Image (cartoon, rainbow, N blue to C red):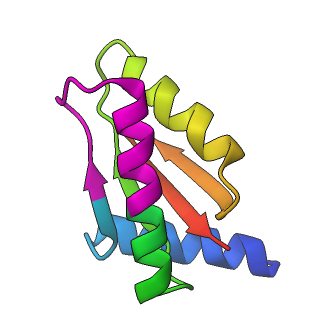
Amino acid sequence: MDDREAKRMAAEIRSSNDELSTLDLHGLHLHPDEVTSRIDVFLCDSFKQNPNDPVEIVCGIGIGAMKKIVKDFLEIHPMVDDLIWKEGSCIVMLD
């Protein structure tokens, strides 16, 4: 098992135990710019507090509009090292 796989496994375990800092966006009716702004602030604050800790972003499972905004933004965000998508949420590894 390489280092990346070990980090992913540890993050999934911590997520299942509700040990990750979480940004919950599901059920909110926000403009895409507000969504990305909230995510950016959350990632920056989380990295400042615990740079090695993964975080979780909850987008819900509705029609997928929020997930698309979150996914598109995270894929280009410079602090994001890796993503683990689960049903209705995403674990984000920061770098």
Please give the count of numbered marks on the rendered protein.
0
Asked whether 2 or 65 is in front, the reply is: 65
- Quarter the C terminus occupies: bottom right
71 or 1, which is in the foreground? Answer: 71
Q: What's the residue at 41%, 75% (across, down)?
A: 46
Quadrant position of the N terminus in the picture: bottom right
Observer able to see residue 88: no
**Residue 65 in sight from this viewpoint:** yes
* As drawn, 15 above or below 31: below
Magenta region: which residues? 23-41
Choose top left, top right, bottom left or bottom right for residue 79: bottom right
- Is the residue 22 above or below the residue 71 in the image? below
- Counting from the top left corner in percent of width and height, residue 94 is at 60, 70
Residue at left offset 70%, top offset 58%:
78
User: What residue is shown at x 59% (from left), y 45% (from top)?
Assistant: 74
Tell me if residue 31 is in the magenta stretch.
yes
Corner quadrant of residue 4? bottom right
With respect to residue 62, does 28 lie above or below? below
**Residue found 34% across the figure and 72% down from its top:** 20
The percent coordinates of residue 76 (x first, y second) are 70, 44
Q: Does residue 28 show up magenta in the picture?
A: yes
- Extreme-right residue of the structure: 2
Along the viewing direction, whichever of 20 and 50 lies nearer the viewer: 50
